[in-house]
Image (tube, helix red, strand yellow):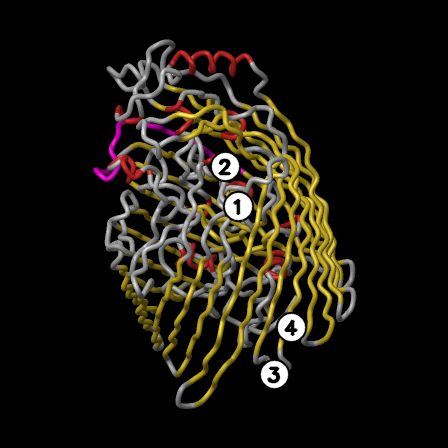
């Protein structure tokens, strides 16, 4: 780990080292004095021009995203998506409470609210978080700042705004802080509003419009040895289009509270946290860009507690002991529609009183063995219980029409099928308990002052989520409501699913110049997953009876899978002068592969080879950047899901920023040459299919050229 003063240049560390330095460091109560702290790449404090989704921040740390709504894209680490990635918001575990994962954890926080963020892909310490096999994304907004005065008074504030032409996007961020030497009160708010964006051909990409707002109020108190923080949150999304889903979000209203307590002793540190998060979520249709008639409702709640005790064994070594408890509850029902022969007369009960309870304990040893060798080893044990109540279908016998009464379903798509499936489901065992063991070994070896080797080895587990295990409907309509893949297929749950178990090995070599003029990092990793949750074909259906509109109904199943990849990152100072300023080069190459062991078929949504090259200039108060991104053609696809191939493409982006004492102005042109391209991780456009079925399930297109302007004023 690298200790440094706030005024020193930020060190660039590997993802594992970044997370360790952020999560495992001793407590440091934030204030305005120049304390020795650990800073990490990803520090975002006071960068208020970052508005809207946190995607732009995390992409810089190697996170890919499966496209969904404007603020709800799902993160992908090393080819693994969804709940396989553990996302923590201020240390709290928030569950996506939706059959389509329309409200994933990152949707509950906006970029301007984030003070720091860390990514550990693949191998992560057991203390970083359990119940995942892909890695951990930790996003933090709690960063109390205090003043030198014992009187509570104004500390700081800001107002930021951004406009983007491609989607007529308007974003606003505001913040205000009061502080004394022992108390801090901080408000952070964000507002986003955007129309559906245009692609490189100038055509509207239907059903990509959205509106959202997030609010947080954080109060903190401290003395010389302890700190208490209370954070309250609220989110309101009145609508958000999901072009690659059959449904849209018509409301997402949530409230949350976090209480954190930290106390330092002579040779130990104690940290406790309690989290509560409640959400009411609705799906349906709100726009002429994708019409239909079918309400779906979800009520869910997360409650968790964490208690951690770090004991210093000597000045270079410590042990961390912890206990964690997580309780997630959900009700998911689809209200019956009066007069409908398909969706009535009863409510369709998809998940009734669903529960997912985790009890975890872990121990972790960390030591700076000598000036060259650092070690972290840990073991985590968890008991995970899932269960649901009895369910019911809309009715017990009438044939049904398609989604929104727009297409006629096949004869097999009847409420009789669902009624029988509900009876069988209610008669089966719906209570499952899994005991899992995670373990990690992390080693950093400083070969010389300019060469470092990082090695990681981990066993990680993830238990199935409630939708993977308990989605019981079998009709075409019911199954196509399940799934967060954006592929247009339907999914059936499997109560007999086993836990995913991943064994990952990772190695990183870092070389830097003696004069800090350049830095090269290379990383390779390999993951072997036992009981990977994939899906096998049950049957096919074709709602439009065209050659290019066939889809599959699949059932979740366990298979074995292998994923591997390599990354190369280069940063170099290329020119410096008084007249032209400092010029820096940034470049990276990433390649990921994944396949099923039994069939050698590629796994779904694995991004093809991509490269990025950027040149930045800093001169006086100006920062300018030119970047080029190239993504290879996607030819390795999952045929079971009818995954589309995509062509290669390249994008050019240009930006400029000027900063004065309190004012920052920014201008950017993204996709300068207005190139048309399809998103390799975008899924299919169901919205376009509903408007014109003749083109079948086309891949979702990316954004065309956009002129973006931003302004931020701090006071």
Q: Residues within 10 Å of mark 4 (few under 14, many from 20)?
A: some
Q: Which residues are magenta?
A: 287-303
Q: Which mark is residue 606?
A: none
Q: Which mark is residue 511?
A: 4
Asked whether the residues under the numbered discs 2 and 3 touch, taking CB atoms below 8 Å apart as contact, a structural biologist would say: no
Q: Quadrant of residue 506?
A: bottom right
Q: Secondary structure at mark 2?
A: strand
Task: Give the number of the mark in front: 3 or 4.
Answer: 4
- The residue where tag 1 is placed is 92
Decide which of tag 1 and tag 4 comes sooner along the chain. Answer: 1
C-alpha separation, residue under disc 3 versus residue under disc 4: 12 Å
Asked whether the residues under the numbered discs 2 and 1 touch, taking CB atoms below 8 Å apart as contact, a structural biologist would say: yes
Q: Quadrant of residue 578?
A: bottom left
Q: Secondary structure at mark 3?
A: loop
C-alpha separation, residue under disc 1 versus residue under disc 3: 41 Å
Determine the residue located farthest toward the front in the rendered image: 547
Q: Residues within 10 Å of mark 1 (few under 14, many from 20)?
A: many
**Residue 36: x percent and y percent?**
60, 71
Task: Give the number of the mark in front: 1 or 3.
Answer: 3
C-alpha separation, residue under disc 2 versus residue under disc 1: 9 Å
| Image-based side of 515 in relation to 408, left or right | right
**Residue 413: x percent and y percent?**
38, 18
C-alpha separation, residue under disc 2 versus residue under disc 3: 50 Å
- The residue where tag 2 is placed is 302
- The residue where tag 3 is placed is 515
Does the magenta segment cover residue 285? no
Q: Front-most of 423 and 549?
A: 549
Q: Secondary structure at mark 1?
A: strand
Q: Is residue 708 visible?
A: yes
């Amino acid at each position: 780990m690298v200790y440094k003063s706030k005024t020193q240049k930020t060190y660039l560390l590997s993802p594992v080292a970044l997370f360790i330095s952020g999560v495992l460091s001793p407590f440091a109560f934030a204030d305005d004095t120049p304390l020795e702290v650990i800073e990490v790449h990803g520090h975002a404090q006071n960068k208020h021009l970052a508005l809207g989704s946190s995607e732009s921040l995390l992409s810089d740390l190697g996170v890919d995203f499966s496209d969904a709504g404007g603020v709800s894209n799902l993160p992908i680490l090393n080819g693994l998506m969804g709940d396989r990635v553990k996302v923590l918001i201020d240390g709290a575990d928030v569950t996506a409470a939706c059959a389509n994962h329309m409200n994933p954890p990152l949707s509950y926080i906006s970029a301007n609210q984030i003070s720091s963020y860390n990514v550990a892909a693949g191998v992560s310490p057991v203390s970083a978080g359990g119940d995942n096999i892909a890695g951990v994304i930790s996003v933090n907004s709690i960063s109390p700042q205090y003043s030198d005065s014992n009187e509570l008074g104004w500390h700081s504030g800001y107002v930021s705004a951004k406009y983007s032409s491609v989607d007529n996007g308007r974003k606003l961020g505001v913040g205000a802080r009061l502080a004394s030497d022992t108390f801090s009160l901080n408000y952070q708010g964000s507002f986003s509003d955007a129309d559906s964006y245009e692609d490189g051909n100038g055509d509207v990409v239907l059903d990509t419009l959205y509106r959202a707002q997030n609010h947080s109020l954080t109060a903190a108190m401290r003395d010389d040895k302890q700190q208490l923080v209370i954070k309250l949150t609220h989110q309101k999304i009145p609508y958000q289009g999901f072009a690659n889903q059959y449904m849209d979000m018509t409301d997402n209203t949530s409230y949350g509270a976090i209480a954190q307590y930290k106390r330092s002793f002579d040779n130990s540190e104690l940290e406790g946290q309690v989290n509560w998060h409640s959400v009411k979520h609705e799906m349906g249709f709100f726009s002429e860009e994708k019409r239909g008639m079918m309400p779906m409702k979800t009520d869910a709640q997360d409650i968790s507690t964490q208690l951690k005790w770090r004991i210093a064994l000597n000045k270079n070594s410590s042990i961390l002991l912890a206990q964690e408890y997580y309780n997630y509850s959900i009700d998911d029902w689809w209200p019956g529609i009066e007069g409908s022969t398909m969706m009535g007369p009863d409510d369709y009960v998809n998940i009734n009183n669903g529960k997912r309870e985790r009890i975890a304990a872990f121990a972790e040893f960390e030591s700076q063995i000598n000036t060259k060798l650092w070690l972290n080893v840990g073991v985590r044990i968890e008991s995970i219980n899932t269960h649901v109540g009895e369910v019911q279908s809309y009715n017990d016998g009438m044939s049904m029409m398609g989604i929104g009464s727009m297409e006629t379903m096949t004869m097999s798509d009847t409420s009789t099928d669902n009624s029988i499936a509900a009876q069988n489901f209610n008669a089966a065992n719906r209570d499952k308990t899994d005991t899992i063991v995670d373990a990690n070994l992390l080693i950093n070896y400083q070969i010389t002052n300019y060469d470092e080797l990082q090695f990681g080895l981990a066993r990680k587990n993830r238990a199935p989520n409630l939708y993977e295990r308990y989605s019981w409907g079998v009709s075409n309509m019911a199954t196509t409501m399940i799934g967060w893949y954006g592929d247009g297929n339907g999914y059936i749950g499997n109560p007999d699913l086993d836990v995913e178990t991943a064994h990952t090995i990772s190695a990183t070599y870092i070389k830097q110049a003696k004069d800090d003029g350049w830095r090269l990092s290379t990383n390779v990793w390999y993951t072997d997953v036992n009981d990977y949750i994939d899906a096998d074909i049950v049957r096919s259906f074709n709602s439009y009876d065209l050659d290019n509109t066939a889809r599959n109904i699949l059932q979740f199943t366990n298979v074995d899978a292998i994923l591997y990849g390599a990354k190369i990152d280069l940063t170099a100072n290329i020119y410096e002068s008084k007249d032209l300023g400092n010029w820096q080069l940034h470049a990276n190459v990433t390649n990921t592969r994944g396949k099923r062991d039994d069939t050698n078929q590629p796994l779904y949504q694995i991004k093809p080879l991509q490269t990025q090259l950027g040149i930045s200039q800093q001169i006086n108060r100006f920062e300018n950047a030119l970047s080029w991104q190239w993504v290879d053609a996607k030819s390795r696809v999952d045929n079971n899901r009818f995954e589309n191939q995509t062509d290669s493409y390249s994008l050019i982006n240009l930006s400029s920023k000027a900063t004065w004492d309190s004012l920052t102005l920014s201008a950017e042109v993204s996709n300068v040459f207005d190139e048309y391209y399809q998103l390799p991780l975008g899924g299919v456009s169901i919205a376009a299919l509903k408007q014109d079925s003749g083109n079948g399930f086309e891949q979702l297109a990316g954004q065309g050229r956009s002129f973006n302007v931003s302004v931020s004023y701090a006071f």
